[in-house]
Amino acid sequence: MTTRIKLRLNQQQLELIDKTVKEGEAADRAELVRRALKEFVQARPTSPAAGE
Amino acid sequence: MAASSQRKILKELTLEPGTGKALEVRRGQVLRIAQTSGRQCADFNCFNLHDYKEFFHTGRTRHLHGLHPTKGDFLWSAPPRERPMMAIIEDTVGTNDVLYPRCSGFLFEHQYGLPVHTNCHDIQAEAQREYGLTPDDVHDSFNFFMHTGVSPDGHPFIAENTAREGDYVEVLALMDVLAVPNVCGADVMKTSDFELKPLTLTVFEATAEDWRNVPDFPKLRNQRSPADFKVKNIKVDRELYRDESYRPEFVNVPLVISELEVELSPSEMESLERLKATGKYGDTDAEVLRYVVFTWWISRFMRGPKHASP
């Protein structure tokens, strides 16, 4: 059972995502987003609020 | 004293208290600003010698190098030029400042009741007048040997001056510049420990060793020149009036919002909900996920300082 999240992004933000995908960091936009979530959480294992 | 023994000296002079000097420093020349007895702040302006509208910018320099630029850092010009104008190749003290603005006549009149007083703005203006610049052309200064900090509650402060006799900074010109150092005129502020002292200036021809101390720097299409401007000529009158032919041409406008749909597994949703519960990243799942994506991107891929809190 998955949940669909709809990110609201402008064309410049999508350009950055597409550029990153094109550079081989993920297979597609959605995979890049999931990777970001995974690595963001891994970097903040005990204190998710720290870091920004 | 790296490399100085092999350098050819082109000019030497002493800056007396209350004064400054506009110096033509060509690409490949080094300007040394040295202490005589120590504990003296030097304010500094810098212009492209062939186009005075390109000038040193504290903001971009602060952005890229922090509040205390030192050896290995650059003096950047203002947007949209954004080129390294000079490189700091030596700094024996390490207490430079790009946080504080220059002191001014207003400041001494307002804070001290002294309407006629040495101040960095007026000293700069008088020195720059030799090259036809006006008091409006003086820009925020690079403050060499100015020991500053920021308190935990966010207020800047001036600390005791730690420069000692013989200490110096050296900047290598990466383009032909008009370099304008001055002895800071603030004798009733902590800047120079309440005594104005002379500074010595030396201009050298840079050696190969000097150039090796200059880090690589970016050369990008967005480091623009007047050739890129829609208005190419400098406005010569003071009044502002509307150009009736003006039609806005903002970049990438309109900004069009679209939706990127992403499917998250139960464990990914659990992580997202935990982040949302902190209340720091947004009010909705989508806002939190967007925050995560770009924060992650910055930490993973962005060049230069991240500007993220610890």
Image (cartoon, grey):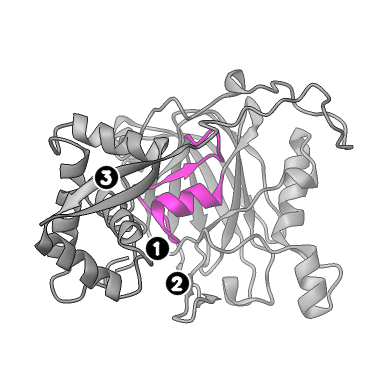
Is B100 inside the magenta-drawn segment?
no
Which residues are drawn in magenta? B57-83
Tell me the number on the disc at residue B23.
none
Tell me the number on the disc at residue B162.
2
- 3 and 1 marks in contact (CB < 8 Å): no
Quick one: quadrant of the C terminus of chain B?
bottom left
Alpha-carbon span between mark 2 and mark 1: 7 Å
Residue under label 3: B261
Query: Residue at the spot x=63%, y=23% of the render?
Result: B229
Residue under label 1: B93
Residue B169 position in % (x across, y down): 44, 52
Q: Is residue B89 left or right of residue B185?
A: left
- 2 and 3 marks in contact (CB < 8 Å): no
Residue B278 position in % (x across, y down): 30, 75
Q: Amino acid at mark 2?
A: Thr
Using a 10 Å C-alpha cutoff, classify the residue at mark 2 as few (fewer than 14 neighbours), some (14 to 19) or many (20 or more).
Answer: some
Q: Amino acid at mark 1?
A: Val
Alpha-carbon span between mark 2 and mark 3: 57 Å
- The residue lying toward the viewer, choosing from B227 and B141, is B227
